[in-house]
Amino acid sequence: MDFVNDVIAWKRDGHELDAGRLRAFVDGVVDGSVPSYQASALLMAMVLQGLSDGETLELARALVESGKMLDLSVVRRPVLDKHSSGGVGDKVTLVLAPLVAACGAVFGKMSGRGLGHTGGTVDKLESIPGFRVQLPQGEFVRQLERIGVAVVSQSERIVPADRILYALRDVTATIECDGLIAASIMAKKVASGTSALVLDVKVGRGAFMGDLGHARNLGRLCRLIGDAYDRPTTCIFTSMEAPLGRTVGNRLEVEEAWQVLGGEGPDDVREVTLTLAGALLALSDLGVDEPEGRRLAAAALDDGRAAEHFERWCFVQGGRWKPGEFHRLAAHEARAARAGYVTRVDALAVGQAAQIAGAGRRRIDDTVDPAAGVVLQRAVGDQVEAGDPLAAVFSRDPARRAQASAVLDRVFSVGDKRPQPGPLVLGRIEAEE
Ligand code: URA
């Protein structure tokens, strides 16, 4: 019986893991002394037994300490960050990052790639020709000082244990544990030097959290870890029943983000962005409360400063941004089978159609097609006639396009009654100042 075997049995039998055991496990995963079959067994015991608040916090500490910690104190200002738990059509970071900087605060983020049916900001940024998502640390810091905004891909030296554990969890059905998710998200935020965070926890059909109760527990755990590290964390719960905005797919989403940056674009993207911007600016050093932060942000969208900041940010990070300048792929259109009102747009199915079309990955090492994706022509509540176009899927590959089309054809439900619009913002947990 070795030590790791005892730890697995201990957790399997419902006992609490102390800091020493958790640290030994995480260290062993990084140095290779804990093989993947033992790590997977312990992860499964954690999923089945759950993690206490104490275990979650200690796991987060062990993860943070498994790698390098970025010190952003040289920026001498709070570096704000936002994290989304993953959604379909969620292009909010593309708008929020330059918007927060245009309002005079500092936004710095290490971001991930999309996996499964949800998208990732790094893939979206890479759909802009030349955009560099890998910057040396010194350049990241200088850019924050100079223009107040930088978004880069997650550094391999930050929380290396999470990289290994996340890949294992992805293939062993062990993602679904609130404590594991909270520790994984927050360890990366703490280690990447975030001063204060707004967490957008997506709830609904297209999200990892199906119901609000579950999402609230995740938010509570993230706040707990944020408090322990003195990183104020506000959690906002937003609906992911239907996709956010009208586009899903990397370059298509950048184009839509550009509209929102110019004071236009879909109302739901603007609303989530302004809600998060108000909450973030209230955590900044600008001395504004949330309503004032929201007003500042709305003004910056409407008077062109946010769009100007986006252009400057792209330029400084090497991106050659020209709206509308990309290759449009061949499309298949889904049409209404009957007349009525759109009662549902299934976010999960839209995400899957976009992924199949080439916008997302099935495995972490798959490549994405920047131009692939879905454009929604109708939203919940819209009236349609039989044969009206509802959505189009764009793909370079005819076989993928056919497969994605079959999924897209099942996305819309049409009924006789116009549905009442559900709330977009479902609740929140305030940061402790
Ligand atoms: N996102 C993360 O970063 N980690 C998880 O465990 C789940 C979602």
Image: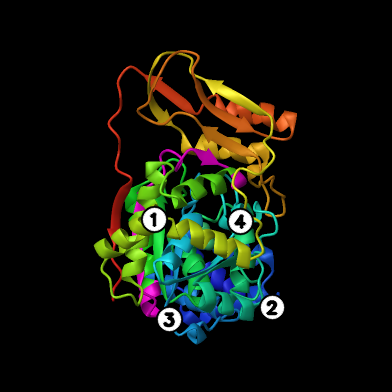
Mark 2 or mark 3: whose residue is earlier in sequence: 2
Q: Is residue 415 visible?
A: yes
Residue in the foreground of this view, choosing between 96 and 157: 96
**What type is the residue that disc 2 sits on?**
Asp
Which residue in the structure is indicated by mark 4?
125
Which of pointers 3 and 1 indicates the residue nearer the eye? 1
Q: Quadrant of residue 143?
A: bottom right
Mark 2 or mark 1: whose residue is earlier in sequence: 2
Q: Mark 3: few, some, or many residues within 10 Å (few <14, many ≥20)?
A: some
Secondary structure of residue under mark 1 = loop
Which residue in the structure is indicated by mark 3?
77
Q: Is residue 140 left or right of residue 148?
A: right
Mark 1 and mark 4: Cα distance apart in space: 24 Å
Mark 3 and mark 1: Cα distance apart in space: 26 Å
Mark 4 or mark 2: whose residue is earlier in sequence: 2
Magenta part of the chain: 225-251
Secondary structure of residue under mark 4 = helix
Q: Position of residue 163 (x, y in %)?
A: 63, 66
Q: Is residue 152 above or below residue 397?
A: below
Mark 4 and mark 3: Cα distance apart in space: 25 Å
Q: Is residue 413 above or below residue 358?
A: above
